[in-house]
Image (cartoon, helix red, strand yellow):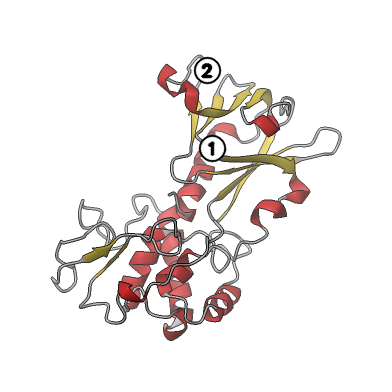
Amino acid sequence: MPEGDSVFKLARRLDRSLLGHEVVRSELRMPRLATRDLAGRRIVEHATWGKHLLTRFSGLDGDPVTLHSHLRMDGEWSVTGPGKVLPRRLAHDVRLVLALETGSTAWGLRLHDLDLAATSDEGRWVGHLGPDPLRDDWDAAVAVDRLRGAGSTPLVSALLDQTLVAGLGNLWANELAFLSGVSPWTPVADVDVERLVARAATALRHSATVRGAYQVTTGSSRRGEDHWVAGRARRPCLRCGTEVRVVAELPNDPAHRRTWWCPSCQPGPGPEVRVPSSRYPS
């Protein structure tokens, strides 16, 4: 699933192709949106909050609107230049078409969550989210308070809860647990939360904005060396040489995703302490 840095980078890529341009034809291939039309509006901003993309359009008669999309596991945006079209094999995946006056076209593929509303009503999609380190209104103190309030919640589960801090997905939850030097299942209240939040914010911003740094957590972009533990099951820990372990997710439980850890560098409780939870907001 794309994480907050993924969606932030997508927004900046869309800026380069779409920002300021007028829509001349639109297709919203979702039943509840089938009669809505964005033609005549200009794309004025691509904002992000956590894993949510908010594409804002100019008003017609003073009514600016926002198109909300969430990529989930396999969603995608693509832009083709004048005279270009998507490969025919992708036609059945298209949920959104925005043709611009430049001749370019934006395509939304496999966008399971797609909605349109007045810009003033964006809270329906993002009002539940916690602070996002990639937003101008980032508030580290609020993030610290929310994480501390999670008490006995395992560290990796707390980091996945988008109502506490928005934009951290499973990769970052695993890597931050390693960098904190504790088991992924350590109660979040037992962790230095201020340091955790500062590290998370720095890492997410670095990943989103520095060329060549996208989701590289070790400082080395060489294959097999870009993550401390995530994706490195049964390989030696890059720090101490101990074999990295992995445990599968609990079925249909987003609070307990697949988890990697080094038992030497990350002492504490193991996966046996996991308790099934209710679905987390995304």
Where is 201 relative to 30, above or below? below
Give the structural element (helix, strand or loop) at label 2.
loop
Q: Quadrant of the C terminus?
A: bottom right
Which residue in the structure is indicated by mark 2? Answer: 82
Q: Amino acid at mark 2?
A: Pro
Is residue 201 visible in this depiction of the protein? Answer: no
- 269 displayed left or right of 281: left
Q: Position of residue 19 (x, y in %)?
A: 61, 36
Which residue lies at the image location 23% right of the left edge and 71% below the top edge? 262
For the residue pair 217 and 87, the one nearer the viewer reads as: 87
Q: Position of residue 270 (x, y in %)?
A: 29, 76
Which residue lies at the image location 75% right of the left edge and 37% below the top edge? 58
Q: Residues within 10 Å of mark 2 (few under 14, many from 20)?
A: few
Q: Amino acid at mark 1?
A: Leu
Is residue 111 visible in this depiction of the protein? Answer: yes
Residue at the bottom extreme, as displayed:
190
Which residue in the structure is indicated by mark 1? Answer: 111
